[in-house]
Amino acid sequence: MNLPENTFKRRLLVGEPQIGVWATIPDASVVEAMAGAGFDWILIDTEHTPVEVSTIPGLLQAAAPYATSAIVRPVVNDTALVKRHLDQAAQTLLP
């Protein structure tokens, strides 16, 4: 089984410019609208927003059909929390 390519990290490694946006509203329709707007990446922030760990899967699913990279920012840099986000299918984290 091949894992999905992490285009965000690949583009970072080659120095390709990317334009993104921070998602601070815990609503899948907002994330989907941002993903459909053509941003290269969307950072789902749980540190300074009302976005809770339990809402992350729905937000990642809302962005998944689009050519945008969804990045999750955990509320704290905690190993157990990072593992939870990885279990929720986050490819990229900003601790």
Image: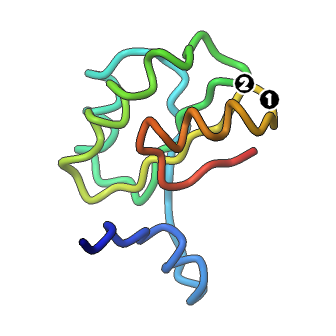
Point out the image quarter for the C terminus: top right
Mark 2 or mark 1: which comes first in sequence? 2
Q: CA distance from mark 2 to mark 1?
A: 7 Å
Q: Return the residue found at the far top.
A: 50
- Residue 86 x, y percent position in the rendering: 53, 44
70 or 1, which is in the foreground?
A: 1
The quadrant in which the N terminus is found is bottom left
Q: Could you tell me residue 48's position as x and y percent?
A: 72, 20
Dot 1: few (<14), some (14–19), or many (≥20) neighbours within 10 Å? few
Which kind of residue does numbered mark 1 sit on?
A: Val
* Residue drawn at x 50%, y 60% as measured from the top left: 19
Residue 16 spot, x, y in % from top left: 53, 82
Q: Which residue is mark 2?
A: 47
Q: Residue at x 26, y 33 (%)?
A: 62
Q: Who's the residue at 23% across and 44% down the image?
A: 36
The answer to whether residue 67 is left or right of residue 49 is left
User: Which residue carries the number 1 mark?
Assistant: 76
Question: As shown in the figure, which amino acid type bears the numbered disc 2?
Answer: Glu
Q: Quadrant of residue 72?
A: top right
Local secondary structure at mark 1: loop
Q: Is residue 69 above or below residue 86?
A: below
Query: Is residue 23 shown left or right of residue 61?
Result: right
Residue 26's place in the image compared with 44, above or below, is above
Q: Are marks 2 and 1 in contact (CB under 8 Å)?
A: yes
Q: Residues within 10 Å of mark 2 (few under 14, many from 20)?
A: some
